[in-house]
Amino acid sequence: GGYLDFTSGRDPKEAAATLAGYLTETSLSQITLSSDANGSQPVWNEKKEIIGITAAKMDTLYQTIMALTVEQGLSFADALSVATSNVAHALKLYPQKGAIAVGSDGDVVILDEHNQIDTVIAKGQLMMLHKELLVKGLFESF
C-alpha cells in the first residue's frame, strides 16, 4: 500500500531507467517522482569526499519525464502521472493538486512541437510565454 518515490537527481536518464525497472514489480499508480530543485546538493570528488555545495537543478524533473517517454517507452500521460497525480494521491491532496479541473490548483506547462517547454502558467499567473520568461525569482532581474 505504500509508494516508491524516486528523485530525478543529477542523472535524469539513470533515474528514468531505475524507475522503469520497478514497473514490473509495482503498479505505476504507486510510483512517485520528485526533484530536489534548488535544494542544497553536495559536490563530490573522485574519493567520494564532499568538496562543496551547489543547488540542485530545476530541469531534472522535466528531463526525467522526457526520458521515461523517449528512452523507456512510457506514454507521456503515464510518465507525467508519476510527478503529478500520483504525488497528489500519495499526499492525500488529490484533486486539489495533481489535476487540471475546476477548483484544482493545477499548473500548466505547454510543450512545443519538439517537446521543449514553451509556456508555463503557475498559480494562475503566466510565467513564461513562447519561451520568453515573464516572471523571475525574487532576487533575479531581467
Image (cartoon, rainbow, N blue to C red):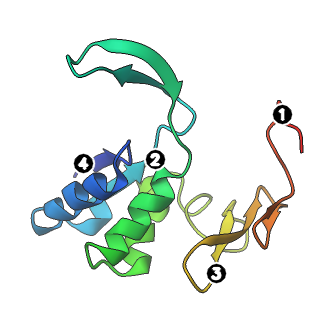
Percent coordinates x, y for residue 26 in the rendering: 16, 62
Name which of mark 1 and mark 2 comes first in the sequence: 2
- Which element is circle 3 on? loop
Percent coordinates x, y for residue 12 in the rendering: 36, 53
- Which element is circle 2 on? loop
Is the Cβ of the residue at disc 3 closer than 8 Å to that at disc 1? no
Q: Which residue lies under the disc numbered 3?
A: 112
The part of the image, by quadrant, that contains residue 126 is bottom right
Instruction: Using the image, determine if residue 142 lies above or below residue 75.
Output: above
Per the model, the C-alpha gap separating discs 4 and 3 is 35 Å
Is the Cβ of the residue at disc 2 closer than 8 Å to that at disc 4? no
Q: Which residue lies under the disc numbered 4?
A: 2
Instruction: State the residue at coordinates (89%, 45%).
Output: 142
Per the model, the C-alpha gap separating discs 2 and 3 is 31 Å
Amino acid at pointer 1: Leu
Q: In this orientation, which residue lies closer to the viewer: 21 or 43?
A: 43
Pointer 2 local density, CA inside 10 Å: few below 14, some 14–19, many at least 20: few
Instruction: State the residue at coordinates (66%, 63%).
Output: 106
Amino acid at pointer 3: Asp
Per the model, the C-alpha gap separating discs 3 and 1 is 27 Å
Q: Which residue lies under the disc numbered 1?
A: 138
Per the model, the C-alpha gap separating discs 4 and 1 is 37 Å
Viewer can see residue 82: no
Name which of mark 3 and mark 1 comes first in the sequence: 3
Between marks 4 and 1 in the image, the one whose residue lies nearer the viewer = 1
